[in-house]
Image (cartoon, helix red, strand yellow):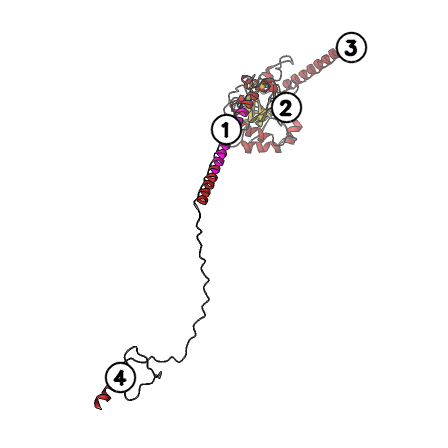
Amino acid sequence: MAGEEQSGHQNDISLPGEINPTGNDEAPSRGVVSLMPLPSRPRYVERPEPVEPQEAEEIEVVRKRSAAQLEKARKRQETYLQKRREKKKRKIFYNRLRALLRVFSACVLLIALYLFARSPYFTFHADSVQLTGQNLLRTQQLARFITPYDNRNLFLINPLEIQQAILKESTLVEKVYVRRSLLPPSMNVAVTEKPSWGILYSGSPLTVEEQIPVPGSQEESANSVEDKPLPSKPQFLLHWDGTKTDLADFALTPQQMTALNHPIPIVSSKPDMDATALTRYRKLAHLLNQEPDAMKLRYLDVNNPYDIYAHFDGFLVRVGRVDNSLNRRMARLHNLLPAIRQHQHTLRYVDLRWNQQIIFKKKSEAEIKAEQQRAEQRAKQKAHEERLKLENREA
């Protein structure tokens, strides 16, 4: 019996992985011990998330083709590739042909333009120059700059060369612009002349009747009207930048003098004055001509730089030299104007050379008598000229 009980106990022992046939999770009765620990039952059981059914994979069915079909497909592919290669070759050929035609057309156009530009129609003639913006300059005076380009093709003329030549050799021109015109073929020259402040004379610019003789000058030593020198011609035009223009080729008219804003005449026997001296005389002339309505400066005599004379309308002022006291000395002239006008017929000149005094130099009786005689001579001469004009008209 003991052996049966022992064998019975052995049969009740559970091995790992065995399932209890009773289905009961509790420990077996009769002291049977399980060799595997029983899993603990969870308190809450989680539901698994629903899984979407996967789409069925498409299975490509490979169709078996016959040898005839494969050969036909191969020929069709070869035909397609051959046509594509021929199309590409034609495209490359036409692109090259179009490029060649463009180059050829451009060459033909350039040759045509070159032949058209070199035609006699575009031949430049010096007499077709049009000058604008000038007051003193004339087309004839620019001929020496234009003549070298006569009968040349208009497109072969460089306007910049003409501009530089005019600016370099003409002291009267401040700015110049040369432009070629095709219809009709000509050349337009637009110039801007330099502004001027004075005109340089070698002698008195006034007529015999207007002259007031400077002491010791040629006018004072003349005894008759015939001995008086004629009004001097202008020699140089004085510009604000210190340069001067030779007026030998110019004939100044009253209209041109008005356009120049009536520059102040400067009388000097030495035309080769430097820019410093011209600047000094310019300041003096504008200082004396501040009130042209009250006393108009007719001209400035600078033959002697240390003894300058200013000729006004009706009287003469002895300025002296240009120094630091010039402004102070000339400021007294405006205060003396009423007294000067009252006695100007008997005054020889007004001496303003001194800082502390003013001298009214009167004419002598002989000078007054000589002036009366000259006035009578001028009246007789004028009457004689008028009588001759009347006789000429009657004849």
Marks 3 and 4 sit apart, C-alpha to C-alpha, by 184 Å
The secondary structure type at the circle numbered 4 is helix
Image position, residue 125 (x, y; %): 59, 17
Q: Which residue is drawn at 59% across and 33% down?
A: 332
Report the amino acid beneath label 4: Asn
Q: Earlier in the sequence, mark 2 or mark 4?
A: 4
Circle 2 is placed at which residue position?
256
Which numbered marker is on residue 100? 1
Disc 3 and disc 4 in contact, CB within 8 angstroms: no
Q: Earlier in the sequence, mark 3 or mark 2?
A: 2
Report the amino acid beneath label 3: Glu
| Camera-side residue of 11 and 274 | 11
Residue 111 showing in the rendered view: yes
Q: Is residue 190 left or right of residue 48?
A: right
In this view, the residue farthest toward the left is 3
Q: Closer to us: mark 3 or mark 4? A: 4
Q: Which of marks 2 and 1 is nearer the N terminus?
A: 1
Q: Which quadrant holds the C terminus?
A: top right
Circle 4 is placed at which residue position?
11
Image position, residue 148 (x, y; %): 53, 17
Q: Closer to us: mark 1 or mark 4? A: 4
Q: Which of marks 3 and 4 is nearer the N terminus?
A: 4
Circle 3 is placed at which residue position?
394
The residue stretch that appears in magenta = 83-109
Marks 2 and 1 sit apart, C-alpha to C-alpha, by 64 Å
